[in-house]
Image (cartoon, rainbow, N blue to C red):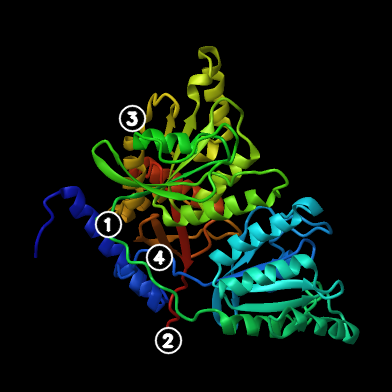
Amino acid sequence: MPVASDPEESLDEVREAALRAGLDDYELSPEDLAALEGDVEPVTERALPILAVIGRPNVGKSTLVNRILGKRLAVVEDKPGVTRDRVLYPAEWSGTDFMLMDTGGWEAKVTGLDLSVAQQAEVAVEMADAVMFVVDSKVGPTASDEKVVRLLRRSGKPVVLAANKVDGPQGELEAASLWSLGLGEPYPVSALHGRGTGDLLDAAIAVLPTEMPQVEVDPDAPRRIALVGRPNVGKSSLLNQLAGENRVVVNEEAGTTRDPVDERVEIAGRSWTLVDTAGIRRRVHMSKGADFYASLRTATAIERAEVVLVLLDASVPLTDQDSRVISQVLDSGRAIVLVFNKWDLVGEDERFLLERSIEQDLVQLTWAPRVNLSALTSWHTNRLVPAIDLALGSWDQRISTGKLNSFLGELVAEHPHPVRSGKQPKILFATQASNRPPRFVIFASGFLEPTYRRFIERRLREKFGFEGSPIQISVRVREKRKRR
């Protein structure tokens, strides 16, 4: 039997074996056993078909989205142009998983409506695998509806026609007039009351693709970096600076970038793939819904990236929009680096106060590497690669089961879980189920409070680093086998 050369490793293995043996007294599922044997594959996201819900302002798109989801996630208000953030939602119907795209944010001005409808519908149809076209059955087809219908026909994408606001037999007669749109059978529904949504969803599922292409990841391919942030924080300027040439348009007007642009660049002698995700350009009479689609494309870029550079403007206080971008990145599970651009615009006397303000505003992100730089002058841009390497190394990191359980054993001995209702849950065993991001599974005899989970995460970072990477901790409560 081979003996570990390091006495500390040998002790970890002994402790792991003892704890593992103790698990035999507990009820374990096949998934538990797979995790314990290290058979859990790294977490990967299966590509899901996208169903876009489009239509004129105030026809009930977000209400219908909430009805399909079974919960109030999309913002609903009795006026057009309310939808702004959170545009993609995971949904399920009759055992089929798909992504639901809620479109909105259109400006209800006659001068800009046709342009707005055409632009936003075109983007939605381009990204979707199928379309749910919502029309107000009480109003009937309008000129704007006809404009979208022509676009849908050119796209060749399958379309399901939803005749909304049908509350009774009279409404069904009104809905029948929508046959004139030439999109096939109009499905009469009431998004507000749920009437007819089952038949509508059955029709939508029938036209969604049953198989989605799987993208093979080349382990030797350049690491993918997404540049995200609110408009005009310098994303395109930084990309050009890193690339060493003007590859994307830069303008003082916020939002000049229309689509994410993948750029292969050489930085510090290494090849990287950068994704610029600035906002969509504005024009006269263009609706504010353009920002809605900038957010959508930014979310797509984040999902395709491995590490995300969140650009923040150091010359102005942190905004709510900055906070939403950061939350979006954290929810994605990607590695993260905070980049404070325009640092050269901050006076020497102001920098101390700015540092204190950043520490207070980002107190939950003390583990994320931070780089202060100037994309315009390239000052301190050489510090980006070390920060990116640090974040990616943490994102890739795996902790051996022996070291993990040894660490938890010492932690629990020093700071046991508090007693609640006369009971104290016991940590039985732990394993790292996957990386990218690091995900840990803890087997326990009882529920671990959120505060104690956060304590474990904090101590994990202190012990093993994980700078720049989110950590996911799940707890599986298992009961002892019943003795016969």
Return the residue at label 3. 382
Return the residue at label 2. 484
- The type of residue carrying mark 1 is Gly
Q: Identify the element where label 2 is drawn.
A: loop
Q: Nearer the viewer, residue 254 or 474?
A: 254
Q: Identify the element where label 4 is drawn.
A: loop
Q: What residue occupies the far top of the structure in this picture?
A: 349
Q: Is residue 257 above or below residue 35?
A: above
Return the residue at label 1. 402
Q: Residue at x 55, y 50 (%)?
A: 328
- Mark 3 and mark 1 residues within 8 Å of each other at the beta carbon: no
- The type of residue carrying mark 3 is Asn
- The type of residue carrying mark 4 is Thr
Quarter location, residue 145: bottom right
Foreground tag (3 vs 4)? 3
Q: Is residue 454 above or below residue 76?
A: above
- From the top left corner, tell me how far across and down residue 111 is, in percent: 78, 51
- The type of residue carrying mark 2 is Arg
Disc 4 from disc 1: Cα separation: 25 Å
Disc 4 from disc 2: Cα separation: 41 Å
Foreground tag (3 vs 2)? 3
Disc 3 from disc 2: Cα separation: 67 Å
Q: Residue at x 48, y 39 (%)?
A: 249
- Mark 3 and mark 2 residues within 8 Å of each other at the beta carbon: no
Q: Earlier in the sequence, mark 3 or mark 1?
A: 3
Disc 3 from disc 4: Cα separation: 32 Å
